[in-house]
Amino acid sequence: MRGWLAWLYLLCATACAEPERWLPLAQVQSGLAFAGRDVKAMQADVNANPAQLWLAQGRTLWDTPAGAAQRSCSSCHGEPTRLRGVAPRYPRLQAGTGRLINLEDQVRHCVSERQQAAAPAFESDPLLALTALLTQASDGLPLQTDADPALQAHRQAGAEIYQRRQGQLNLACTHCHDRHWGQRFWTDALSQGQPNAYPLYRLEWQRLGSLERRLRSCYVGIRAEPPPLGDLALRQLSLYLNWRAEGLAIEAPAVRK
Amino acid sequence: MAGARLLLPARLTLGEVVQVRLLIQHDMETGYRQDMDGRVIPRNVIHLVRCELDGVEVFRAEASSGIAANPYFEFPVRITQAGVWLVQWEDDAGVKGELRQPMKPG
């Protein structure tokens, strides 16, 4: 009897163990692959792509001295292209404090600490314009996450959120984006929920929006209470999404429905 | 912040008809939405867009509630000489915007 139980346990441990990646890296696809023909055309056309308006604004802000320090982004960093390779590495741990921060947090930190100006609010035009500019500087580069153990703990926390059922619909992210991507959800194709193109222009929002905003609208979609803007849970979740999409190329400026 | 982009083909030939493309950044509040307290958010859309080429009006659009946010306009113009484009727009809140862009056919 005991031998039979041990055998059953072994069978379960091997067969029922969760795979490390529900979505194999070889199958990872950008959200653009699930977009309609018109959205693809809008993104591809440099002139019709409305995200260009924010990029132009970001470029102006980049060179404009501001705050008590009367410094601009370019006085420290030079051209935005010099920061190629920076965007795909966020969220990451902030040097010194060890906090998990995303690109938006870093820009706000720079504005308040280096320029000594009021940090732009989350989802405000100036913040989106600057993060879009920095993301565009890394266009085509693969997403990557550091192997830092402290970061892995956050990634694990993000993975738990991703797998946890929540909201009135009692769904987890994984149910749609790992197991049913490519299938129809009303009129839309379900995407894999990849973070590689944010901040992007979403036609539903009629403006640019960050990954954080997109995640919050997923919470609303499953009738769960969204975490507040700037919440650690959203940072952990986007870290997990980055890890899940490792190698997927940054795509900016992007448009989605 | 309202910006705009006026786009012309990279190569312009005199006498040729070209497609001019215009993108304007604006939220375009329809006037049908309510805020969290149930008060109607007043309509604020760009109700007039004008494009001049060297002082001659070549395009005018009078928009209303149905206009998309960050609208995209495209219109044909015959290029007869070098000149300066002037794009002007005004929204319901009385905010005016302007874009000047020189053009040189080659």
Image (spheres, rainbow, N blue to C red):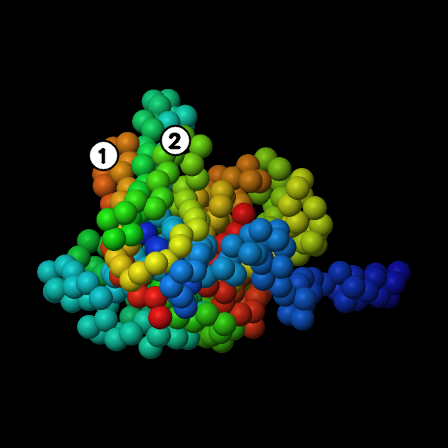
Residue A167: x %, y % from top left: 57, 39
Q: Residue A248's quadrant in the figure?
A: bottom right
Residue A75: x %, y % from top left: 19, 72
Q: Which residue is mark 2?
A: B64
**Placement of A89 over or under A162, stated as above or below:** below
Q: Earlier in the sequence, mark 2 or mark 1?
A: 2
CA separation in Å, label 2 and label 1: 14 Å
* Labels 2, 1: one chain: yes
Q: Which residue is mark 1?
A: B94
Viewer-nearest residue: A14 or B35: B35
**Placement of A99 over or under A128, stated as above or below:** below
Query: Relative to residue B12, is residue A26 drawn left or right?
Result: right
Q: Residue A96's quadrant in the figure?
A: bottom left
Residue B65: x %, y % from top left: 40, 30
What residue is shown at x 87% (from left), y 63% (from top)?
Answer: A4
Q: Amino acid at mark 2?
A: Ser
Query: Relative to residue A120, is residue A193 drawn left or right?
Result: right
